[in-house]
Structure formats: C-alpha cells, structure tokens
Image: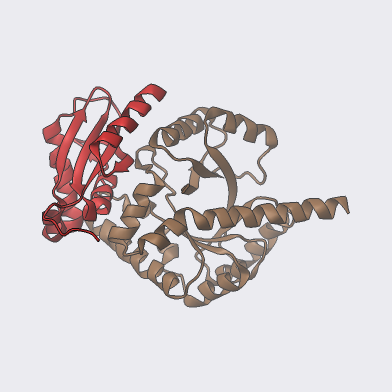
Chain colours: A brown, B red
Amino acid sequence: MTYFESRLPVNFERINDLQNRLRLCEKIGIKNIILEPQNDLRNISLDLKKEIESFVKINIFYRINLKIDTLDDFKSKIKNYNKFAGILSVESLNKEVQLRSAKDSRVDIISFSDPEILKSLTPGIVSLTKQNNSFIEFSLAPIMESNKVLQSKNFRNLYKYIHLVLKLKANFLISGNFQNLFNYRHPRALISVCHTLLGIPLVLAKKAFSINPELLIEKVQKSQNNIFNFKIN
Amino acid sequence: MRLITNKERQRYILFIIIQENKIFLDQKTLLKSIWKSIWRYFGMKEANRIGLWLIEFNSQEDYFILRCSHETKEIIISALTLIQEINGRKIILSPIKTSGTIKSIKKHKLLLNNIK
C-alpha cells in the first residue's frame, strides 16, 4: 500500500530549501507527496515541475490552496480556476465561504487544517462535500506542539471533528501539513497516531492516507482529460 | 488449529534516527526518551503491555531495532513518532520496517545499507 503526504507547504522560490525538504522526505521513506506552494502561485509551470521532480525519486503532485475571508473574495478568486487542471483546496473561517466551496465543483478539498478553522466544521458542510464528491481535510500539524495543554486541546478537537466526519461517512483526507523540517513524519507513523490517540479504526486511517488521496488524484486527472477533450473539440 | 501457548507473539521494528546536529546519543538517553513518551501519551495502562526491548542500537549508522508485543506495535510507533527532541536537540525517529522475525529485519537493514 502506498501512502501519501497530502499537504507539504513549500516555497517554490527557495529551491535549495525545497530540495532539502524533499530529500528529508525521501530519507524518511515517503513515496508520494502533494506539494503546496506557499508563495502566491496561480499555476505551476511545467519546467519548474520537471526541475522539482529531478531532485528526488518521489511521486510528486501539486495543489493550490486558497485562503479566503469573505464570500466576495471567494467569488473573485475562484473565477481564475475555471479550467484549472490541478488540485484546488479552500481554507476559510467564514461559514458562508465553506458552504459555497462545498457546493462548488471546482473545489476538490475543503481544508480544516488550522485549529481555529477546525472548530467551524458543521454536519451541513460534511453533507455537502458528500454530495459533491469532494474531500474534507484534517491536518496533524497541531499535535506536534511541545506545550502539553495546547497539545491535548488540539488532540481533543481533532478527535471530536474526525469522529463527526466518520459518523457521517464522508470522504476525508489526513495530511501532515508540517512547516518545520523536523516535524516531518512518515504517513505510516501518522496512521499509528491516528489509530492509537485519535481512535480512528486502522482500516479507515489507512484509507485516509492512501485510498482517498488516490481517488482525489484520479478525480483531478479525469477532469484534466475532460478539459483537454473539450479543447480539442 | 492454532495451539494455545504461553509464548507471546513479538514484533521487531527498525527505526532510523535523523538528527538536527549529529550528537552523541547513547542507549540510555534513547530509552529514557522512549519511556517518557510512552508514559506521556499512553500512561501505565498501556506501558505495562508493551514488553519493550532494545535489540540493537547503532549510533554510527543511525538506526536501532526495538522488540515489542505484537498487540502494542501501533503504540510504540505512535510514541516514537511524537518524540520531537532529545536533550534539547531536534530529532526524528522514523519507522522503516516491521517484522515478526529478527532475521528478516536484519536482512532489510542490510538492504538499506547497500542502498546507502
């Protein structure tokens, strides 16, 4: 079974740093990574992709994350991604934006990575993502906290909202989303954490790290082919 | 039919050590950190089920092999995943291979060395 690190934020302008990060991932044994540009990139050029892929022997995929505050902001930004052929995720504290992006077929992932944003997750959004075949994303970055009190709060919130999603049988991804180099962990190790400390059954935890990211990539590749066919016709 | 015996099934786990700055890390410090993490996240209830044993430790080649009960494999991996620093130095203890026999884990270790 191949596991995915579904979110690895990197700055594409700092190539040396990016190279170091990817090398560490390779050393840990990660086989599949979805990179997220931290700098405001709208599209990643083919040349840049080739350069990045030459650094390591890892399957690399790309995603764009939109951090949005208001509904108007969402409407104006999403227009640029009408024929976008990559993974698109939306992260917002605003419930209206979350509901709108859950209904929007251009959005593939509704991200609840930030502990504050996580608290705004409701069954309504979960239900909409189910209808739209999109994914809800959780991140394990908040659990790598040295302060015990904060760490246990983050564990509690993750436990609560992951179990809400499990109960509603929605599609979800669990990513690392680690900023610090020395917080990087192999997805198999994160599966163990999810199973033992977040009470997710082992099969479902493995699904969130392997099958669901594969489904997401398949979905995006299908839409990519549709855009290509549309252009030919 | 499976015979009921007193013998507990074991798991051997190969971990690699990735450090910020290469420091002298000895068995005692490593074990102390592992137990500290087990106690912090799982407490007495799980700690007494683990049956932890450090089979091999190599600070030069940055790896070690742990033995534990097969039921607590996930607990051990979680506890080691959540270790972020030892003696104030950033560290990653990453699981590479889990096996039921020491022979196959050593074979895997040899393969890893050859790749290096």
Tell me where residue B102 sits by quadrant: top left
Whether residue B12 sits left or right of residue A15 in the image: it is left
The image shows residue A165, relative to residue A62, as above or below, that is below
Locate the C terminus of chain B by quadrant. top left
Is residue B116 visible from the viewing direction of this image? Answer: no
Q: Position of residue B89 (x, y in %)?
A: 24, 34
Q: Nearer the viewer, residue A34 or B46?
A: B46
Is residue A124 visible from the viewing direction of this image? Answer: yes
Q: Position of residue A39 (x, y in %)?
A: 57, 42
Q: Position of residue B67 (x, y in %)?
A: 19, 42
Locate the N terminus of chain B by quadrant. bottom left
Tell me where residue B23 sits by quadrant: top left
Residue at x-position 30% and y-position 36%: B104
> Furthest-right residue in view?
A233
Residue at x-position 33% and y-position 40%: B97
Residue at x-position 19% and y-position 25%: B24
> Furthest-front residue in view?
B1
> Furthest-bottom residue in view?
A124
> What is the tally of numbered marks visible in this picture?
0
Tell me where residue A158 sits by quadrant: bottom left
Whether residue B34 sits left or right of residue A183 in the image: it is left
Residue at x-position 58% and y-position 57%: A215
Q: Nearer the viewer, residue A117 or A26?
A: A26
Whether residue A57 sits left or right of residue B77 in the image: it is right
Q: Nearer the viewer, residue A185 or B105?
A: B105
